[in-house]
Image (cartoon, grey):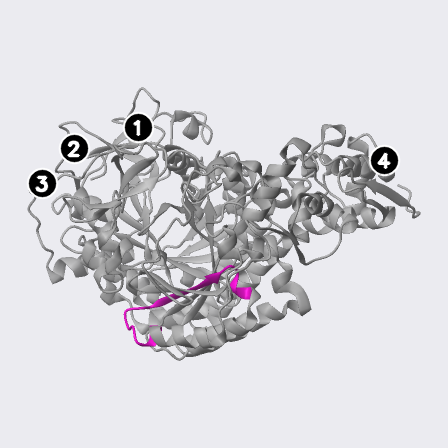
Amino acid sequence: MESYDRSITVEFKYSGMTIDVSLSGLTDAVIEFFDIYGTIPLAGKQLCNITKKGNGRERFSELLKKTGYPDDPEGFFTEILSAVGSGKIKKIKPGQIEIPHLMLMAILEKVLPGHGYISVKDTWQLEKVTHLGVPEKDREQLQKVIETYPVRLSRHTIRQMLVSKDVAYQYLPFIEELDAGGHTNTWIGQFHDGLLEQMYQNRVIFLLNMSCPVYCRFCFRKHKDSRNEKNPAVADVKKAVRHVKDSPSIKEIVVTGGDPFMNRVNMAATLDGLMQVDHVQTIRLATRSIAYYPDLFLENESAYLKYLKQKNFELQQHGKRMEVATHFIHPDEISPESLEIISDLVNNGIAVYVQTPFLRDCNDKGPELVRLFSLLRGAGAELHYIYIPCSPIHGNSIYWSPLSEGIRIASYLRAHLSDRVIPRICTATPIGKMDWYSSGWAVEKVKENENFIWIRTPYTPDYFKAFAPLANSLANIRVNGEGTIDIQYMAQIGDESFLHGPRPERGAMEKKPASSYDIERLTSLLINERQTGPSIVDTGHEELLRLHETRVEINARADKGQIDYIRADDRITDVIISSQTDAIDDLYYIRPLIKKLKGIPHVNAIRLLSMKFNYDPQAYTRAVINTLGDLNTLCVVNPLRLEIETWFTLAREITGTHAKLAARLNNKGITVYCNTALLGGVNDSDGHIHSLAHAIRKSGMEFHHLYVAGLPVQHEWNIDHPVDSYDVIDIATKVRREGSGREIPRYMISTKLGDVDYGLTSSFVHDNKGTKIKLGCYDLSYYKGMDKNFEFPKGIFARDDGFPVVQVPGLVKTNNFPVS
């Protein structure tokens, strides 16, 4: 491969721009890409399989041969850049080999270097800065769109848009935005005073800055009036802080905008002011710049990141935590820079939560979400919400999907994603969020307007009295027979079998309270007996359990055969390490085991089962914490995330010692996940679980799974002390209404064929032989994909649709309502 330098001329058809690019610069960019990012998770299977092993130069030489350009990098780059310059956004496939998105970004950073953002005022400027065409027949209407809904793009997103229709779909204006369907505002903000908005009793919003470096076309604040609203001043921030100080029920502050990070003065006044308010527990900073304008955090030697880390340390000294909330929609938005920012924040004790709007024809099929969430998880992010549908705002109809499609995506994700990265399926109604099939559902269509449906929410009229009596007088709400509010929501249901009607009254069922002795015995069982499910298929290894397509459990002393099994199946992303006593007792064996697993590129997370975190937190000495920190690798390339998994039953078990330990682990980038078994007469009330959820959140841990039924301890106890499915909905309703959205667990049922979500990826099957559920996410082919000899166990049968039905002992239904 010749290395002498000359230039390649790139001609952009629509902007008329001509650029000469150094051939050696392009070559160096691709070689560097192979050397640093040329792994399967980042570069894809096809590229890695055809270029095999070797250094970057050797692998690039192999790519040239396979694409039909042996020793001809000039021809290779000319074909790629001609495709880019044509303005036709499409996959680029020289020699039928698709060039991965991140490699194209490395090339385009040489062609169109630079940072910053550009406000677009007319269609001619749009063509010039994006190098993409505007059809003449659409030019007049598109100009109206730009004047109605402002357009702003970063140079980073412009490079992405040139080779990804799924990125361009989010930021380029389109004439369908002139469609009058939809709302001017999609939520009410029941209390509004200056920069402060309050929608929930326990948290408020600070709007620090009204503009963003990039404008998403689906944003619920997309109107020109919102974009051009005057930014608040420091005096406004101080006024909002005083309001919070005078409102002891407010525990969390969501700092947003626009992008609040664009207003450093207001950000500083907010953090410094709230730091002094005793009852504030969490400050949540919202930004999408991690995805579309990472230079905001990385410029000036990552000055903003250093500032945030310092402020987080100060907040911790005041007993508070900082979090960052961001949006990612599609894997083509992932960049090394965005992963670097996430890892840096999480490694320094700042949790990063990702929310994902569900966009029709962009991320609504499933595989793209699996790839997106897997990459973000390796960097350290928590995957929190998928919003269905996209905001019903003016000009957004192109993005809307029927609700049934968004609900169904949960089954695909449950089957093919790690349980750690399955977001909650959520709808943001005008009076607050609800979670599908736990705290809410679709009731019926609105008779007077075919564009709306009634949604059952977890909120009550009394809930709003303390801060927003306006909510009780709205014309689009009604109080249902339960006493919660149904609200009219603008959406199509799609499949009408997802309309479930009102919830009936509770059926009669006697409850037996547990004694102190019973609770102590059950706690001992949880400490001493393994609670995860059995192996769902035969692995050929007695001590290797296949719990899911993506997840296995091995002992700390796993042998080579078990490691080879994991290495041979690239669907396995998560490895659980258990021990005869506690994972912390077996670090001598776990350290070399993790080093072996780190050599398997598709494994990106290790979880250590540790009940000592619960009952003996002092076992986590400084030396243990440092050792765990050394084993945790949150990074861009080949991450291997370390997690602690433990169990709690009641809020009173959680102490300040647990909070201090969780903070120390968080500051090493290690997240602690808590599971809970719902036990009849012990903790199966909304009050118990709400208190537990709040205690877990306050202590800096993640409430992962609330198991409704199916665990060994539940098989033993709940047979005689059954849990009423009606209580599950009451619990979910209270936790959503009274707590933080970050406190909400996934409501799960454990079965011998794997875990399923209560109501969302499972459904009740009615007969007279006990409570049964259909597993809506797993069919026979799913299991045969892991074990070709698999057959359903005796007593389990598949329905006509191919999904198995299983018995659920200890869970009782007292009515035929589909949800509870």
In the picture of the structure, the residue carrying the numbered disc 4 is 75
Residue at (67% x, 37% y) in the render: 134
The residues bearing labels 2 and 4 have C-alpha atoms spaced at a distance of: 67 Å
Report the span colored magenta. Answer: 244-261
Q: Is residue 459 visible?
A: no
- The C terminus appears in which quarter of the rendering? top left
In the picture of the structure, the residue carrying the numbered disc 2 is 816
- The numbered dot on residue 496 is 1
| Magenta highlight on residue 656 | no
Q: Secondary structure at mark 1?
A: helix
Q: Residues within 10 Å of mark 3 (few under 14, many from 20)?
A: few
Instruction: Report the amino acid beneath label 1.
Output: Glu
Instruction: Report the amino acid beneath label 4.
Output: Gly
In this picture, residue 219 sits left or right of residue 119: left
- Which of the two discs, 2 and 3, labels the residue nearer the N terminus? 3
- Which of the two discs, 3 and 1, labels the residue nearer the N terminus? 1
Q: Quadrant of residue 682?
A: bottom left
In the picture of the structure, the residue carrying the numbered disc 3 is 507
Instruction: Report the amino acid beneath label 3.
Output: Gly
- Which of the two discs, 4 and 3, labels the residue nearer the N terminus? 4
Q: Residues within 10 Å of mark 4 (few under 14, many from 20)?
A: some
**Quick check: 317 above or below 449?**
below
Q: Is residue 343 visible?
A: yes
- Which of the two discs, 1 and 4, labels the residue nearer the N terminus? 4
The answer to whether the residue labelled 2 contacts the one labelled 4, judged by CB atoms less than 8 Å apart, is no
